[in-house]
Amino acid sequence: MTDIMAVMNLTPDSFSDGGDISLTQDAVLNRAQTCIDEGATWLDLGGESTRPGATPVPSEEELSRVMPALEWIKARLDVKVSIDTSNPELMRCALAGGADMINDVRALQSPGALEACAAADVPVVLMHMQGTPATMQMAPEYQDVVGEVMAFLQSRVAVCQQAGIDKSRLVLDPGFGFGKALEHNRALFASIDAFHRAGFDTLIGVSRKRMIGEITGQPVEGRAVGSAVAAALAAKAGARWVRVHDVAATRDAIAVMDSLG
Ligand code: 7PM
């Protein structure tokens, strides 16, 4: 079964199209409730933009964006909450505040991240990235993209296990768009099942990404249909979570795929 995880970027301008909506309790809860109504059973809260070229956010600011939202949602709504962070301080606070998953695009490589997650008992997403968000899309290069991504993630699995994180808690993510050209993303998408055969759940995030734009010719605001089809294909391949922006479209695409596919 594939769960729909809705992206909730808690960056100051991301609740509208460039407008300056502050992260009020009402705005956060309304957005979360809409995602739930449309079919999301998980929300992925992020306070630091991992977009190519984005500037890093200070730790206190990331905490001040994410922690209130986590508390509001956990107090009022029936939904699981993932925290999209590489910051060990936020990991610890969020886990103490009832977070249900840690989603780390840096695969717990920040000092203290392994220890923060070892102290809890929730799933941890280990994602592959080549390079850093500032430079990763400039010249992605691999000899054997599937082999290299799998080897990196397996090496992080070993490190996590040594740190006391049980293998059953680890979720693998090839990291679509994080230092990958379309050909690399296509090879990884075709290999999703290899991660399952290695004994892991997967989380797949392709929503609105450049690869969808390259395939469809659409700008970011026109990528919902392409993203929903890709999410349904990931679900068909057995992904445990799909991380998406367009929840209702994804729900319908998966429902049709389940019924007819
Ligand atoms: C470019 C790259 C633009 C990435 C926007 C993004 C993932 C994630 C993000 C993912 C996991 C976005 C992102 N993508 N976490 N965080 N997997 N685990 O589309 O694919 O929001 S950020």
Image: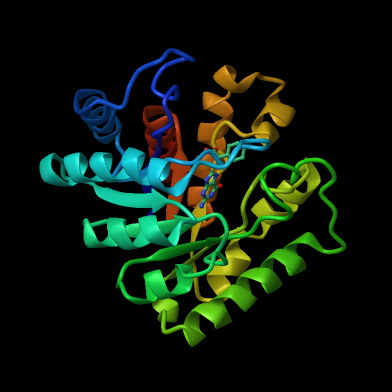
Quarter of image, res 28: top left
Residue at 78 percent across and 60 percent down: it is 145
At which x and y percent is residue 192? 60, 59
Figure quadrant of the N terminus: bottom left
At which x and y percent is residue 179? 73, 48
Q: Is residue 98 left or right of residue 125?
A: left
Q: Is residue 210 visible?
A: yes
Q: Is 166 rendered above or below residue 238?
A: below
Residue at 58 percent across and 29 percent down: it is 226
Quarter of image, res 24: top left
Residue at 47 percent across and 70 percent down: it is 112
Residue at 68 percent across and 36 percent down: it is 53
At which x and y percent is residue 18? 49, 15
Q: Is 200 rendered above or below residue 69?
A: below
261, 119: nearer the viewer: 119
205, 81: nearer the viewer: 81
Q: Is residue 239 visible?
A: no
Q: Is residue 57 left or right of residue 176?
A: left
